[in-house]
Image (tube, grey):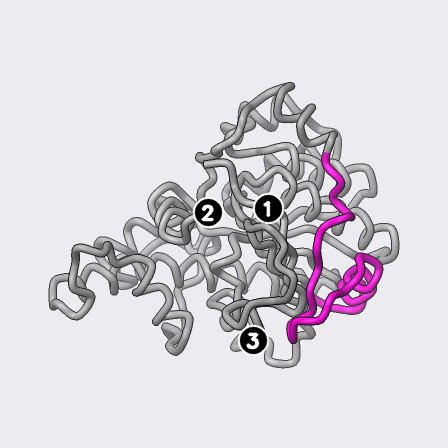
Amino acid sequence: MNKWLVVACGLWLGACASVSPHGSGSAAKAAASQLAPRSVAIFRSGGTRAEWNELVDAAAQAEVVFVGENHGHPLGLASAAALFEDVVARCPKAALSMEFFERDEQSRLDDYLTGASDLATLEKRAARSDGNFPPGHRAMVETARANARPVHAANAPRQYVRLANREGYERLANFTWEQKRLFRVPDFLVTGRYRDDFDRVMTPSERDPKAPEEQERLSKVFRSQQMWDWTMAESLYVALANGEAPLVHVVGRFHSDFRGGTVQALEALRPATKTLIVSFVDADAPVALAESDLGRGDFVIFVGPSRE
């Protein structure tokens, strides 16, 4: 999937939570059932081939596993769900964390996980459908539910993120405690490759990224991106403090590729965290890992092109 589309829909629609390029309902579930999620092409960070069991072993030894996905990709999400299932089978304190549920939806998730509500009620209360709760995500939640594991609604509600975009973080300073617990204002804005890549993919080809008005626009949108990054990182920090590990955090891969913004925010909050970055790339498997993909993740997994 085009990176511009991945990041842009995340920023304006709530981390792609309401967009899916694939079919819905029973057709999507049937298609997912035909996939071979553990037979994907896996490369180590340096470019050598790896096997599924090596990936699971590494994930089981981590504190946080960043699963960088392509939103709505059937095989990619099925493979991520299989990884979480295998980690849960090995690790009694493994838990799930998701970019795609926001903190104000936590009680709705918890009601379903504990049996206080059924799936239809969860989907109604959280406004979920196959478009924003695809079979792969649902499979992860079901694995957690079947094994009595937590699922963390890790992200900031979009209304606060939009306020930060339009009016700055100062707009949130006088909110109530109940509001403030739903988001984390960044301690600082990260720089380096993550910001450079963000500016590049968020700048349409017909615009000059150095123009003052474009720089102002990019800065506003990056405030939104970073509020997501830091809120998710804080959610992971709190879960780790509660003794949960490994935490499998499912997130759009722009946030975690090349140790991106969410990873950097967690490292700032908890420098000693043992992390594992798994990047699911929506492209056909190469014979050898391209130079541009070296270091993308500790493991780089190719799951075939997205169906636009």
Residue tagged 2: 1
Q: Is residue 19 magenta?
A: no
Cβ atoms under marks 3 and 1 closer than 8 Å: no
Q: Nearer the viewer, residue 130 or 74?
A: 74
Residue tagged 1: 304
Q: Which mark's residue is nearer the viewer, 3 or 1?
A: 1
Residue tagged 3: 267
| First in residue order: circle 3 vs circle 1 | 3
**Circle 3 — which element?**
helix
Q: Which residues are magenta?
A: 35-64
Q: Is residue 212 left or right of residue 306?
A: left
Q: Is residue 54 left or right of residue 292?
A: right
Q: Is residue 214 left or right of residue 148?
A: left
Residue 240, image x and y in percent?
A: 68, 65
Residue 255, image x and y in percent?
A: 49, 60
Tell me which residue sits at (36%, 72%) in the image.
Answer: 189
The amino acid pointed to by label 3 is: Glu
Q: Nearer the viewer, residue 92 or 301?
A: 301
Tell me which residue sits at (24%, 54%) in the image.
Answer: 204
Question: How far is the residue under mark 2 from the one under mark 3?
Answer: 28 Å
Q: Which mark's residue is nearer the viewer, 2 or 3?
A: 2
Tell me which residue sits at (59%, 50%) in the image.
Answer: 284
The amino acid pointed to by label 1 is: Gly
